[in-house]
Image (spheres, rainbow, N blue to C red):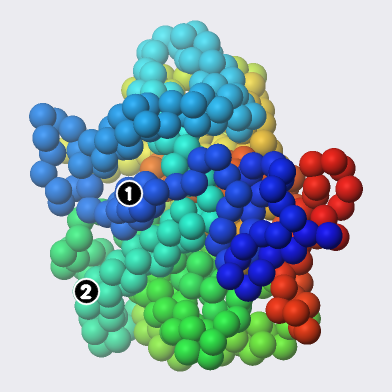
Amino acid sequence: MAFITKQGQVAGLAQWPQGVSLPGGRVLSQFPTTSFERFLLVTLIIILPLEEHIPAVAGLSSLFILFGVLGGYVLVNRATIFNKVLIHRVFLASYAFIGVSALLESLSPFTMYRDIFRFGQMIAGAILVASLCRDRLALRACLYGYIGLALWLSVVLFLTSYGTLSGMTAGNFDEASVIRHEVMQDSPVTGNFNGFAFMSVQGGIVALVFALAGGSPLRCRLFSVIAVFCLVASFLAMSRSAVAIGIVSCAAVLYAHGIRHGKALILVGLLGLIIYIVVPDTVWSRMTFSTEVREGKMEARADLYWKALQHLDDYMIIGVGAGNFWNKWGFDHGFASGSAFSIDVSGLHNTFLQVTINWGLPGLLALTVVIWQAYRCLPKRSGSDPLALGVLGIAVSLVLFLNFTHNYEDKLLSLGLGMLVASRYWIWPSGLVLPVKKHRSQGLHFRKDLHHPSGSSAL
């Protein structure tokens, strides 16, 4: 029998294999992370929305430089690890997607490889994150980074919009959208409000996970307050997609944790009640979606979806090409919008539709394979471990996010995909998360997922 003492020491494991995760955040690993690596990961997450506010250097954005620092550090100090992660099945599928899309793009009359190149950069970022996030300490640091990011963004959203929204009323979606535009003008942080809302949602989900995980009453209350604060703030951006993502992601986390737990149901019930009471009425006026034609036009997003459906035969087989879509085909088929002085093609606000228009069913199939391989990295029985449950919440939110954006090269995907690969490659290589059991009389922690090298069970 092998066991783990209260101090986290492992008895009877002199010949145990590397890479076994232990209770209390300890890991038997050949490649434990350093404080500096965890600092890099947390910094990368927390400053994500500030890219436009930090001056560029030689035309390079701050985040591009930070990713460059990560890349240099990994290649110099963790080359072996980098080579291992480089051929993970998720990234192999990503390389295939790049190859398929590039081949089909070469058939377009207006070739443009910008989006493919950015997707490649996103995958490179995910590889770096997966190379750095090698143990529970690093994964926990990343999840705390999401909470830190959501907290400061939520403060900005509250200070910028809560007072204004509370003092105004809107009778319908259009009026609420005008108010939202006015609020955005006053924001001290430049960027996409939908993106800000989504980041607040992700932090709120992680905080909810830690609140559900238990521990001391003070810890539970603290994370509960953070979850409420961040999720309420996400509503203040008046983003329908963020609200939908938050609801579904929280439901997924609750289901994985176990809806039979009365504490979880009470916590989520209180969360919903507080949100309903605190969120200004103006916000609810924008939480609608309609396909009705009013004053000769549909709602913008519904109109884009309808036009994509109408022209299905034009792009279903091999697509029209990304360059063609943004430069000619999109104009010719009604996807352009703007004023008489500036008319631009609008993206589809849906990754799956956008990829299908760009590169047809082959491109969509290649992207689906990437998502499927990422899905296979999700730890099973994640409800027994708060870190695994946090990874699940982030992964679910990102899959839902793809349904509301055509920016499939977003840096948020680098972080989430990298953490997902890392969790499966380094922390739960078997893919299964088993609970830690404590022997009451001896104070020892037992793990069902620990096996002796000889093949016999550790238990």
Question: Given the current orientation, which residue lies at the most extreme right position?
Answer: 456
Q: Residues within 10 Å of mark 1 (few under 14, many from 20)?
A: few
Name the quadrant of the C terminus: bottom right
What's the mark number on residue 231?
none
Pointer 2 residue: 160
Residue 300 appears in view: yes
Instruction: Find residue 388 and report its horizontal and vertical position in percent.
Output: 62, 59
Q: Which quadrant of the structure image shows residue 174? A: bottom left
Q: Residues within 10 Å of mark 2 (few under 14, many from 20)?
A: many
State the residue at coordinates (45%, 47%): 33
Pair 1/2: label in front: 1
* Residues at marks 1 and 2, CA–CA distance in whole angstroms: 34 Å
State the residue at coordinates (49%, 8%): 107
Pointer 1 residue: 36
Instruction: Find residue 91 and report its horizontal and vertical position in percent.
Output: 56, 29
Instruction: Find residue 429 and report its horizontal and vertical position in percent.
Output: 68, 43
State the residue at coordinates (67%, 87%): 263
Q: Is residue 316 left or right of residue 13?
A: left
Front-most of 409 and 92? 92
Identify which amino acid the numbered label 1 is placed on.
Phe
